[in-house]
Image (cartoon, grey):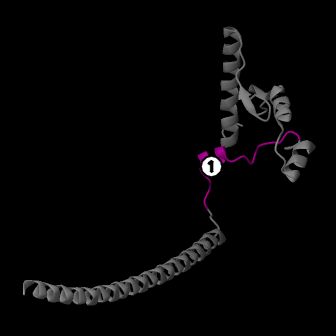
């Protein structure tokens, strides 16, 4: 008797397990589809938010441009301060061309310097005199200012002359003691 009862119980358990596995599969399938739908919804929402954010940024930029244009149309009728006068370069006199023809050609072609060209430029050291202050500087290559080694007495003379020239230039710019 025991053997027959055990066999019947085992058969019933196997049938229940197969039905439960089918249920599990169906549940898994449903949950997967739900997850997919949720993912799609989230992605859609994310895209919408991104679009809205871009629109807001564009509007902000347009508003900024409008506000920048408005203040410039209103003329400012105040006298510039001494500092502004001193910092502006209206009174500066240009001595010669700003760029050589070779430099202009390079800019138009936008070709970088070769190593040889760069080294050739850097090897040129010239003495430049600032006409306003009277300072003499050593300029290497395109505009790197290098230090000149001089004796102590010469250094003192240069310093005196430069300080005096700086003071005079400053006073000229401010309009004091012309």
Q: Of residues 28 and 79, which is closer to you in this image?
A: 28
Residue 27: image quadrant is: bottom left
Residue 145: image quadrant is: top right
The residue at the point 87 percent across, 47 percent down is 106
Q: Of residues 90 and 117, which is closer to you in this image?
A: 117
Label 1 crowd bin: few (<14), some (14–19), many (20+), radius 10 Å: few
- Position in image of residue 154 (x %, y %): 71, 12
Q: Quadrant of the C terminus?
A: top right
Q: Is residue 156 left or right of residue 31?
A: right
- Position in image of residue 83 (x %, y %): 60, 45
Placement of 87 over or under 61, stated as above or below: above
Which SS type dominates the magenta stretch? Answer: loop
Residue sitting at the far left? 1
Q: What range of the chain is rendered magenta?
A: 78-96
Is 37 one of the magenta-colored residues?
no
Res. 177 visible in picture = no
Res. 69 visible in picture = yes
Q: Quadrant of the N terminus?
A: bottom left
- Position in image of residue 105 (x %, y %): 90, 48
- Position in image of residue 19 (x %, y %): 27, 90
Q: Of residues 37 and 47, which is closer to you in this image?
A: 37
The residue pinned by badge 1 equals 84
Residue 35: image quadrant is: bottom left
The residue at the point 67 percent across, 30 percent down is 166
């Amino acid at each position: 008797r025991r053997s027959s009862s055990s066999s019947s119980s085992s058969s019933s358990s196997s049938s229940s397990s197969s039905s439960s596995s089918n249920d599990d599969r169906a549940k898994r399938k449903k949950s997967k589809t739900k997850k997919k739908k949720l993912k799609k919804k989230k992605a859609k929402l994310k895209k919408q938010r991104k679009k809205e954010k871009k629109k807001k940024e564009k509007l902000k930029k347009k508003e900024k441009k409008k506000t920048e244009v408005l203040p410039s149309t209103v003329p400012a009728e105040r006298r510039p301060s001494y500092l502004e006068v001193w910092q502006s370069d209206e009174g500066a006199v240009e001595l010669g061309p700003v760029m050589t023809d070779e430099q202009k050609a390079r800019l138009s072609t936008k070709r970088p310097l070769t190593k040889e060209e760069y080294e050739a430029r850097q090897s040129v050291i010239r003495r430049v005199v600032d006409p306003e202050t009277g300072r003499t500087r050593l300029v290497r290559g395109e505009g790197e200012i290098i230090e000149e080694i001089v004796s102590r007495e010469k250094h003192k003379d240069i310093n005196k002359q430069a300080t005096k020239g700086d003071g005079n230039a400053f006073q000229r710019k401010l309009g004091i003691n012309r």
